[in-house]
Image (tube, helix red, strand yellow):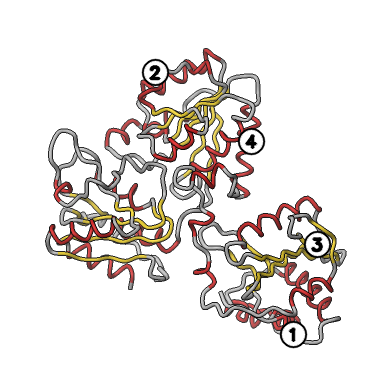
Amino acid sequence: MKNINILSLVQAYNSLEEEAFRGFVDFYDIDIKDAEIEDLKQLVESICGTLQQPSFLSQFYVGYKIPQIGKEFDLLKVGEDYVLNIELKRESTVEKIEKQLKRNKYYLSYLRECVHNFTYVSSTGEVYLLDDDENLILSDIQTLIGVLAPMVVSNITNLDHEFNPSNYLVSPFNSTEKFLADQYFLTNQQEDIKKQIVRELGNVDARFISLVGSAGTGKTLLAYDIVKEYKQTKNPLIVHCGYLNEGHQTLIRDGWNIVPIRDLRERNVADYDAVFIDEAQRIYESQLNDTVENIRNSNGNIVFCYDQLQTLSDGEARRNIDEKINNIDGIIKYQLSEKIRTNKEIANFIRCLFDKTRNLPIHNSHNIDFVYFDNVNDAKSKIRSLSDDDWEVIRFTPSQYQNEHHEQYSNTTCQTSHGIIGQEFDNVAIVLDNLFYYSDSNVLDYRGRVYYNPIKMLFQNITRTRKKLKIVIINNQELLERCISILK
């Protein structure tokens, strides 16, 4: 997105024909509705009535959205010493204005320590300011001009690069301290679903609830956020269908009740007000049936949190736990659809990698990289160096019964596909060896014998990244050519 002089934007709206105006805003990559620009017009006129130097109205980002989470700001100007944010409203309540500006300060504080947040209400001409103590006060245009006029604007080539996803994409497992300290916000969709689930859990009768979301929708954060609030007055149990990670252990030390699925038989679900089954797509049918029966008998509550696509073996897929959960009598379903963790560039790359017929646009911002080796030893050396250099190299989970091809280059100190379930990392590295190929139907396949499904494990591993992806290709020209083709 390009920055723009908002006086120029308003005058273009006033004088240009509609087609010419749309071409004008498209050039600046601005998506603005007529009603919104009418609000902006009133603000500009109010400022220009006092301000003698319209140049102060330049270098604004209009309708800027933070990559991945889609958090939007109506007007944003980044100075060397502080950030100025102005939200435009036709009308609103004090409560809504205060809530929005507090959120804005949270996100923008990663750009500059000092953030000035205003809201302009066009129907009344009122100006609101969030002060340093996060109190909302009624302000005026003069105060806004006093912040705007002396700004020394930073020379930013690409504003997207100023936001680090790890700052605001908080994970209960990989950003546990931030999670426990409430240093995060939910999206509007997450908040709406949370209110409904908390309300359902407050009913007297037993409740069976499913919370479904694909990779990147923030399902795990939402589920654990609900538990965090619920445990203030109730006694919940989290059952994780996989290995417990370091984040789980930190939460347990903080007083959370969390057990791996294999230990569920040692717990009496009747002792808990609600049971949350995380990564429920991996539960065995017998475990599912026993738990549902026990919840009914105890008149309790259960929330199944899962992504039906994140199975790691053919056996898990054949169980079709999603269908069995949906067939539970009285199940209440909630679906997360907004992608908040997914880097669009990486998401498109993944789609193209797994399906050779797809040709999606990818803005190459150097978040995706690959290296090629024609022998295992050099590849293994590279993998070892990546592990020592802030890259999470995720290896396939090996079989307990036989040696598999991928073990010859795997670094056994790296986490496995099963070990990183539900986690996310800034920088992820994965390996494509010579046994990967494209089938006759042009989808990615694997010709080696393995216990766990390699395509499913690859998908699990590659979707764990928040920021950067590196691919180590071993003696596979077909995959090398495909990666080059995708990124051209």
Residue under label 1, please give it.
15
Question: Could you tell me residue 400's position as x and y percent?
Answer: 18, 34
Residue under label 3, please give it.
128
Amino acid type, residue under disc 4 in the picture:
Gln
Q: Which residue is drawn at 75% across and 80% down?
A: 149
Residue under label 2, please give it.
265
Residue under label 4, please give it.
196
Q: Which of marks 3 and 1 is nearer the N terminus?
A: 1
Mark 1–mark 2 Cα distance, whole angstroms, equals 72 Å
Question: Could you tell me residue 10's position as x and y percent?
Answer: 73, 79
Amino acid type, residue under disc 1 in the picture:
Ser
- Choose mark 3 or mark 1, whichever is in front: 3
Question: Could you tell me residue 242's position as x and y percent?
Answer: 36, 34
Question: Could you tell me residue 8's position as x and y percent?
Answer: 70, 83
Amino acid type, residue under disc 2 in the picture:
Arg
Vertical side of 78 occupied by 429: above or below = above
Mark 3–mark 2 Cα distance, whole angstroms, equals 56 Å
Q: Earlier in the sequence, mark 3 or mark 4?
A: 3
Vertical side of 114 occupied by 213: above or below = above
Mark 4–mark 2 Cα distance, whole angstroms, equals 30 Å
Q: Does the CB distance between marks 4 and 1 fall below 8 Å?
A: no
- Choose mark 1 or mark 2, whichever is in front: 2
Q: Which of marks 4 and 1 is nearer the N terminus?
A: 1
| Element at label 2 | helix
**Which image quadrant for residue 72?**
bottom right
Most foreground residue, 133 or 37: 133
